[in-house]
Amino acid sequence: EVQLLESGGGLVQPGGSLRLSCVASGFTFSTYAMSWVRQAPGTGLEWVSGHSVHSGATFYSNPVKGRFTMSRDNSKNTLYLQMNSLRVEDTAVYYCAKGNSGGSFNELEYWGQGTLVTVSS
Amino acid sequence: QSVLTQPPSVSAAPGQKVTVSCSGGSSNIGSNLVSWYQQLPGTAPKLLIYANNKRPSGIPDRFSGSKSGTSATLGITGLQTGDEADYYCATWDSSPLTVVFGGGTRLTVL
């Protein structure tokens, strides 16, 4: 059974940093693309970043480019999202999601339960 | 303002059919595959349709997808009260290089 378990969310002041983790199980983590998607309270889904194992490339949405860094440790089956220079508008539930292939970012077949990040003074 | 445009809400009676539209442009829907997600209240999204019209295992054939030009459509037949949820379309946008989601459509089964 595929499972994705996020952690690391919490309350942080504007300008602060947080690192989210997502532990994966039930599939060969190193062979699938992974993404982070967020959802601000009462709003829709927003893709944040994704890593392709086909190309080795990592992509970011414009609002987080230069502030967030996505990485993965295949030996630990873990995905990370390092978030720096956090802004109030980064407040959201952050989901990690598994692509259905090594290069798929928008075909997200499994999702974690999400972790809430609140940026507030 | 989402890159992909969806109606904010749709509604229909139990047993009826409903469609949800998703309109984009040449750099996204026009040149890439479309996915659809269902998000039940308080839960994580679930993949309903990928590659324009394919269903993951376990998704009933009441759900269907299609694409034409720069628009895509999700169809749901035999509506059930359990289908009440938010539905999102998504695709890759070649300029810039990101995934874009629609703003979401809330389905109400009257």
Image (spheres, rainbow, N blue to C red):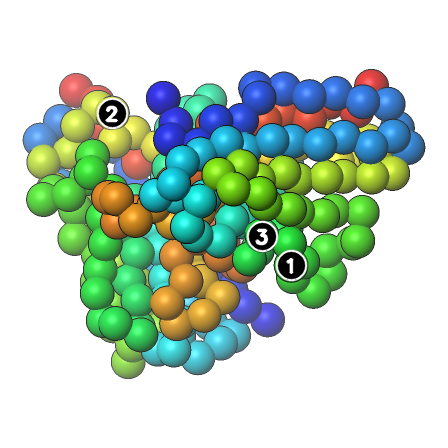
Relative to A80, residue B98 above or below: above
Confirm or deny contact between disc 3 and disc 1 (CB under 8 A): yes
Q: Which residue is mark 1?
A: B54
Name the residue located 71 percent from the left edge and 32 percent from the top edge.
B19
Per the image, the residue denoted by label 2 is A89
Crowd class of label 3 (few under 14; some 14 to 19; many from 20; radius 10 Å)? many
Q: CA gap, disc 2 to disc 1?
A: 35 Å
Are dots 2 and 1 on a single chain? no
Dot 2, how many residues are within 10 Å of its Cα: few (below 14), some (14-19), or many (20+)? few
- Total numbered badges shown on the rendered structure: 3
A32 or A9, which is in the foreground?
A32
Quarter occupied by the C terminus of chain B: top right
Residue B86 in the image: above or below residue A37: above
Tell me the distance, in whole angstroms, between the alpha carbons under discs 3 and 1. 6 Å
From the top left corner, tell me how far across and down residue B106 is, in percent: 62, 25
Tell me: A49 left or right of A106: left
Q: In the rendering, at what x and y percent does residue A63 appear?
A: 20, 34
Amino acid beneath label 2: Glu
Res. A8 in view: no
Q: Position of residue A56 (x, y in %)?
A: 23, 71
Q: Residue at x 40, y 36 (%)?
A: B25
Query: What's the chain of the residue with tag 1?
Result: B
Amino acid at pointer 3: Asn
In the picture of the structure, the residue carrying the numbered disc 3 is B52
Q: State the separation of the CA atoms marked 2 and 3.
A: 32 Å
The quadrant holding residue B8 is top right
Which quadrant would the N terminus of chain B be assigned to in this image?
top left
Query: In x, y percent, where is residue A41?
Result: 42, 25
Which element type, helix, strand or loop, lies under badge 3?
loop
Label 2 sits on a secondary structure element that is helix
